[in-house]
Image (cartoon, grey):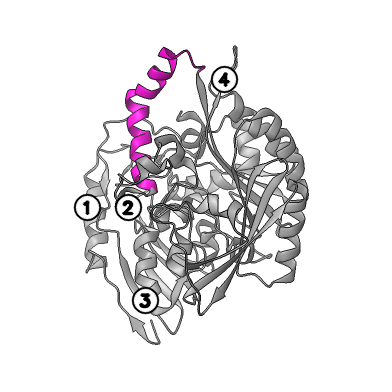
Amino acid sequence: MTGECAPSYGPLMDYPAAVAALRRQYDALPAGARIRLGKATSNLFRQREASTTPRLDVSAFSGVLEVDVAGRTADVLGMTTYEDLVDATLPHGLMPRVVPQLKTITLGGAVAGLGIESSSFRNGGPHESVLEMDVLTGDGRVLTVRPDNEHRELFYGFPNSYGTLGYALRLRIELEPVRPYVALRHVRCASAAEAGEVMAREVAAGGADFIDGTWFGPDEAYVTLGTWADAGTPSDYTGMKIYYRSIQQRETDCLTVRDYLWRWDTDWFWCSRAFEVQRPAVRRLVPKRYLRSDVYWKLVGFEKRHGWKAALDRWRGLPDRGDVVQDIEVPVDRLADFLEVFAREVPMAPVWLCPLQQRDPDVVWELYRLNPDVLYINLGFWGTVPLEPGQDRWHHDRLVEELVESVGGHKSLYSTSHYDPDHFRRLYGGDVYDVLKKTYDAQGRLLPLYDKAVKAK
């Protein structure tokens, strides 16, 4: 690298040695065995396929190798969480162009599985800020992949591949400058249609640095506009105060840049309600270090393994509940159409709204094609809903999939999917994916995308 460089080392000091050790692990696996990662964190909501297959130890691939301040880039290992990445870049007045909402999302995971945040209306997804990657492919090669070399097809096919073509070991990404504070303005809207109009207008105007929104119901939504600021009196939502509730309570606000980036993590958006920690009497007893998404995720994992809450609900005579955990994108002019049906059929609120537009209109991201001329709104809704007699646990999930397609939208694959194989191929890469699979994982040592995204539930 050139320019003023400020190394910010994680636990890894010798990247080539770590790659060589990983290759030895790969070669030691039984011939034809599935390749799996031994990963400490996950933000996937679909079930992982049960297996006793040995996993590759990738713990060495966590850390920031180098921050090039002058060039505004960073070399980052694939298993680095965004929490650690941000901690390495903010001291230099820089941040990744897109920082997904939860601290333990990894950079490699966000690129292979897509990500989004309130800068996505101008920067697209995290994969659009990647300059090059070193990828461990399914056939055991470690390849440097760039948009201008012989592996460009893997570069453009890697996003939304979810580790079915290979794993990113190192990524060079673009950074952008920050200022100390983010000033917020919460614009109340009387309908989803008005919220869509406000977001489209603000994106076109170009005055905001960050835009997202929160839908609380058919007649109450807010568009939050964030702008960089050099001074302010910041609020603190890492303790007793709850960020999403403040959106309804005040028109303006201010956060430090770090607290803005993690404003949603403290309460996992609003999902901490399920653990009673939004009740003041309970919240006072919880140390601040436990108010974070990965702690709630562990509680969810415990419930999925043991089902104590579901059993208690049945004992209390409450109806069974189905998971509805999805992120989807719809064109901004169809936002109201989607939410009209959603409000009627899926009793769940709030819903997160985040505008997204492809950064480079000339690029085609093969496994998750968006129309570069369209502003999309990402909708995130996460929780459970009561099931009526005769409804199975996936009833609302399937309804959402059908609704998304009816309004010309797209659905992320980090949660449960229900498409049949032919339909899935039409939506997520089809023949292009098949060619990539044969080129980089000819023996099928990584699960195919359909098996991983649809069958594993």
Q: Residues within 10 Å of mark 3 (few under 14, many from 20)?
A: few
Q: CA distance from mark 3 to mark 2?
A: 23 Å
Query: Is 198 left, or right, of 43 in this rendering?
Result: right
- Main SS category, magenta section: helix
Sequence-first tag of 4 and 1: 1
Q: Is residue 110 above or below residue 210?
A: above
Range drawn in magenta: 293-319
The residue under label 4 is which amino acid type?
Answer: Leu
What is the crowding at mark 1: few (fewer than 14 residues within 10 Å), some, or many (at least 20)?
Answer: few
- Residue 396 falls in which quadrant of the image? top right
Q: Earlier in the sequence, mark 4 or mark 3?
A: 3
Mark closer to the chain start, 4 or 2: 2
Q: Name the residue carrying label 2.
A: 288
Mark 4 near mark 2, Cβ–Cβ under 8 Å?
no
Which mark is on residue 91? Answer: 3
Which of the two discs, 4 and 2, sits closer to the camera? 2
Q: Are marks 3 and 2 in contact (CB under 8 Å)?
A: no
Is-magenta flag for residue 297? yes
Q: Helix, strand or loop at disc 1?
A: helix
Residue position for label 1: 24
Residue visible at 50% across and 36% down?
453
Mark 1 and mark 3 lie on one chain; the one further toward the N terminus is 1
Q: Nearer the viewer, residue 224 or 358?
A: 224
Q: Are marks 4 and 3 in contact (CB under 8 Å)?
A: no
Which of the 4 quarters of the picture holds residue 118? bottom right
Q: Is residue 43 shown left or right of residue 380?
A: left
Picture coordinates of residue 231, whole percent (x, y): 50, 79
Element type where label 2 sits in the image: helix
Q: Which is more N-terminal, label 2 or label 1?
A: 1
List the residue tagged with mark 4. 387
Check the picture and name the quadrant holding the N terminus: bottom left
